[in-house]
Image (cartoon, rainbow, N blue to C red):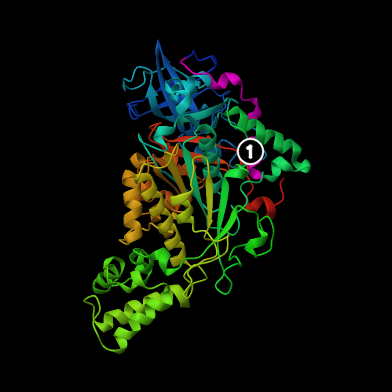
Amino acid sequence: MEQMKNFETAQNLTAESQTVGTVEQRNEEIIGRVAATKQQGNNSREFYFWINPKARVNPLDLLVVKEDTRRIYAQVLDITSYSDAESFLEVFASTDFGDVNLGESSVERVTYSVAKAQVLGTSDSVRMPVQFNSPVYLADESTIMELLRVGELKDEYRVPVGYIEQSNGVRVPVSMDIRWLTGPDGAHLNVSGKTRLAAKTSYVLFLISAILQRRKDTAVVIFNVKGSDLLQIHEPNRLLSSEENAENGRLLREVWRCMGLEAKPFDREKVFYFLPSRKEDFEKINSDTNNLPTTDDDIMKQPGNYFFYRYTLGDVRGKLRLLLSSQNPNETQMQFIYALDNDPDSYALKRDTFKDLCMALQNHIKNDKKYLDAFPSTIMVVKRYIDSVTMNMTTGVFDYERHSFASVKHRLPSDYIKQSLQAGQTMVVDIACINDYEQQWVFADVLKAVEELMIGGGRERLRKVVIFVDELNKYAPPGSDSPLIRDIIDITARGGSLGVILFGAEQFASRIHPQVYGNCANKAFGLTDATEAGSEPYRAFPREIKDRLSELQRGEMIISFDFFGQPLRIKFPPPACRKQEDVDEDVD
């Protein structure tokens, strides 16, 4: 796999890398010195330095500048090479007017490289510009740990988020205070980047595994939105289980171990899967079966931790507002829908099935009688909405005629959350093969159930619930004012204090509601094209950081976490659990 190349030498991370505290920079090789000119000075945010011709430096490498006892921490933004030639014509002429076979120019040139660096912090918290001619070093392990505030982290709150790899071979685990990721100090995560190439899901799975290994008070809800991608995460990555990939498996285990983690899939005893049923047969699952324990679509033939879900009228009582919001009802229709949800005389509270409810509404239409202060014309439109979403258009998420199911395999994700969810457990809710409005309903129903649980104080030892959904732009697009988007905004605004944490991912951060995106204290960016990098969510980045976004490799992210204060490039290993790509693709 391509991502293996990004960490295959990471087993060289030493135990010393995980010590804490401020220690002296041990790598004393100066790579350059701070420079300034009349036209180009240095300020408190950026500075320039010339580079030793023998040094090798990459953009986004971390640096330290020494000024007596003071240290300035920085990262390379860009590198430019210069010569003393006045013009390209002069250079062309000095090669005998374009003789490409001429090994050397007829004129000896002075050439040099200058790097632009961004200040990340200082040892004394004073933001004075860097002094002229100060020596510049590539940061070693101890300096990087000092920059990342490792010494301030208590072990109980420390969670790895990746590792940094320098061009001088230094590799250092990156950890943060989990209270800045899952609240209350900061909360929520948004990951953006190109589909597949950015490995967004892989990074979130890595973070979730790290959280579950480090914290015993957290449960996780994962939405599977692509094929059968996440429908067997209790099984190991093929790199860990295949003899053909024994060496890659060893490297995978080692890089996880060097971050203080065990490369293992999600706990088989604590993972539960919820799959939608087919419209024509509720015991047949409407899921991609390629990555299931058995490829049979009969839910009874799947293991005991696999369930099917199917909603009846009783399951949506009081929530018709959410269910019918996909039909874009007008204000008058919404008033009637609200009455159906809340009025004691509502048929929605007294009938057993959607079919019975619609028949009762049809009687008022037929007899031209008002009902709950709504005219027959309004009743007719709302009835048509109910018929459409629960009978005509549904893939099987809703049952028009039944009011209950005798099968032991029937379980709604929201019911499980309210009744059974425990700390350490992971729920995977499959929504890959159902309609968009059904996806929105299931997501909203789960979000509501988690919120209600945590507002009530959670459950014994359960203090946090992390909800991960890819394609967040479907549920929180800019300009939307649906009931669902209002719930998502509310969760991102106050979920950190409640313990309801949203991990969202999408291809384009610019297609997320600005309030939802702005409320996320932690943002990660994978491979991103230049057009997207020029949009509003990236406005605070220096131009050079934006340029780097289009150069990231699989297994690399630029993270902008409030805990660190500045964007950093990190690497991360493939997930230790099985994904669909492990089945579909050969491993190099």
User: Is residue 471 among what the camera can see?
Assistant: no
**Residue 278 drawn above or below residue 42:** below
Task: Report if residue 20 lies within the magenta region.
Answer: yes
Q: Find numbered disc 1 in the image and state the secondary structure of the residue it sits on.
A: loop
Determine the residue located farthest toward the bottom in the rendered image. 367
Q: Is residue 434 left or right of residue 480?
A: right
Front in this rendered view, residue 31 or 320: 320
Task: Give percent across and percent down for residue 515.
Answer: 31, 50
Asked whether residue 68 is drawn in magenta, I would say: no
Q: Residue at x 38, y 82 (%)?
A: 359
Percent coordinates x, y for residue 393 in the rendering: 47, 75
Left or right? Give the position of 551 relative to 473.
Answer: right
Specify the farthest residue to the top.
68
The residue singled out by tag 1 in the image is 264
Residue visible at 40% across and 78% down in the picture: 356
Q: Identify the residue shown where x is 48% and y is 13%.
A: 23
Q: Nearer the viewer, residue 345 or 57?
A: 345
Other residues around mark 1 within 10 Å, as few (<14) / some (14–19) / many (≥20): some
- Give the image location of residue 500, x and y in percent: 39, 44
- Residue at 41% in and 27% down: 48
Question: Image check: 231 left or right of 78?
Answer: right
In-image side of 489 versus 575 (left or right): left
Q: Residue furthest left?
A: 373
Q: Position of residue 395 (x, y in %)?
A: 52, 71
Residue range of the region highlighted in magenta in the rendering? 1-22
Q: Quadrant of the N terminus?
A: top right
